[in-house]
Amino acid sequence: MGFRQRLRLVLMIRALVCTMLPLMSCVNVRGLQHNYGEALSKSILFFEGQRSGKLPPTQRMTWRKDSALQDLYLLPPHTTTTVFPFLPKVDLVGGYYDAGDNVKFNFPMAYSTTMLAWSVIEFGKFMGADLKHALDAIRWGSDYFLKATSIPGIVFAQVGDPYADHSCWQRPEDMDTPRTAYAVSRDHPASELSAEIAAALAASSIVFRKYHLAYASRLLRRAIMVFDFADKYRGSYNDSLGPWVCPFYCDFSGYQDELVWGAAWLLKATKRPYYLDYIDQNIHNLTNFAEFGWDSKDAGINVLLSKLLINNTSSDSKPFIFNAEKFVCAVLPESPSVSVKYSPGGLLFKPGGSNLQHTTAISFLFLVYAGYLKKTNTEIDCGGNVFASPTRLRQIARGQVDYILGSNPLNMSYMVGYGAKYPERIHHRASSLPSMDEYPPHVGCKEGSFYFESQNPNPNLLTGAVVGGPYLNDSYADHRADFVHSEPTTYINAPLVGVFAYFKSHSP
């Protein structure tokens, strides 16, 4: 019997035990009791460490300071668009750095904002005092995207020269690399970028209806405008801005999924039949039912629409339910159609770097879909006498986040600042260099290399940051240079906010 067959047998036996014993006996096989409330607080705090721009008086991660205050543009941005005879002053101060560098990549930033908003929409009622901080995290993104889409017919895609930035190891407060702004237009479009920003604005508008109706209305109006732009002027930003966005955040799945994703969020935000008709007309373009993340939105679309159309008596929801269930069965370890890998310690793995981005996104979708299954009093038939109940989906999600928090062969948390043992040498410029408080003088482009190469722990704790995660064999080296495993990103953390909120109020 080969390794994969043995692993599947072990997972099937474990799954069978999980259905026969109390939930706690399967959740945490190493006996650790996790504080999901603490993990929630820290997962949101991380976003304060990623802020770009003028920091507010309420900033809690105080070793970070103001940065990129000159992201202001009076001249046409560096882009492959036509030269405009007049371009108003554009203020692009704000937003988030995506990971351990100092570039603002708007495509993954928009996805992160969408997922923060979805976390609050689904699980905000469980967040308690952390809800305020979650709202602040969303607004830091949505305010920036209002700026990035302030000129009709123009959408800003990125701020910062990624090649110059990646050749330096500098604090964001010290940056002296080019803060080039890249934009797309009617002639050189980026439907995936624009539609994802529309999704982020629409999802954020739903969140803020309870708290700031005028702001929510502004977000929704802009979301509609940006989505119309994305749909009318179709094309990929790989073609318009490929030399600058690739290889960092190339779009590998095409832009059709983002168009449907954007329409789905506008359907949820407006209830307009137009968007449901649009989805029906374009859903055939989606082929990656088991993928979800900053690049591919297919599984997220199916889960979102299955729940959104729960009371629809027509056949509109059937294709989404069918594909959502195929997605679940492709992940469920005991399913005969499982297509993902699991480490010996039980961590879900998919191809590509920064693996925990897949783990956190899928865990979030499992929790959301579990809620749908419970409301409809159904379970999923995966074949081979394997059925997925709401309880089973929640068990899978809990097992994954427990692994992240330390229930793994290394007894190591992959969230910085959580637990007794966690990554100390993360691939993150601001965290690894002395703070401005500790060392006020300017640190030049190459002067930071000493800190990059140092074997010492990072001097600044980026609390709540979840790194890329371990290798498939459950090992972890904790090397700053090993960015695939040691670099945190906003899109790893964003889905976790909702997952931790749910488990905070639903502990075994």
Image (cartoon, rainbow, N blue to C red):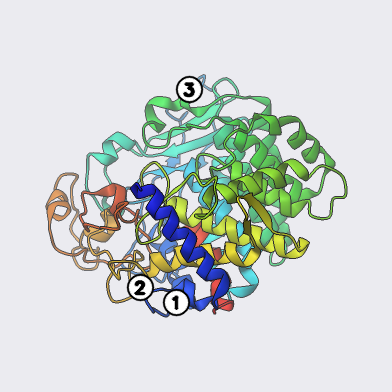
Residue nearest the viewer, comparing 8 with 416: 8
Could you tell me the amino acid type at mark 2? Answer: Tyr
- Could you say whether the residue bearing mark 3 is in a helix, strand or loop? helix
Residue at which label 2 appears: 418
* Residue 39, image x, y percentages: 44, 72
Q: Is residue 392 left or right of residue 375?
A: left
Taking the view exactly as shown, the residue that stands out farthest to the front is 1
**Sequence-first tag of 1 and 2:** 1
Q: Is residue 203 left or right of residue 497?
A: right
Could you tell me the amino acid type at mark 3? Answer: Asp
Mark 1 to mark 3 CA distance (whole Å): 43 Å
Could you tell me the amino acid type at mark 1? Answer: Glu
Residue at which label 1 appears: 38
Vertical order, 228 against 340 (above or below): above
* Residue 425, image x, y percentages: 22, 60
Residue nearest the viewer, comparing 430 with 438: 430
Q: Residues within 10 Å of mark 3 (few under 14, many from 20)?
A: some
Labels 1 and 2 touching (C-beta < 8 A): yes
Question: Is residue 246 visible to us here?
Answer: yes
Taking the view exactly as shown, the residue that stands out farthest to the right is 313
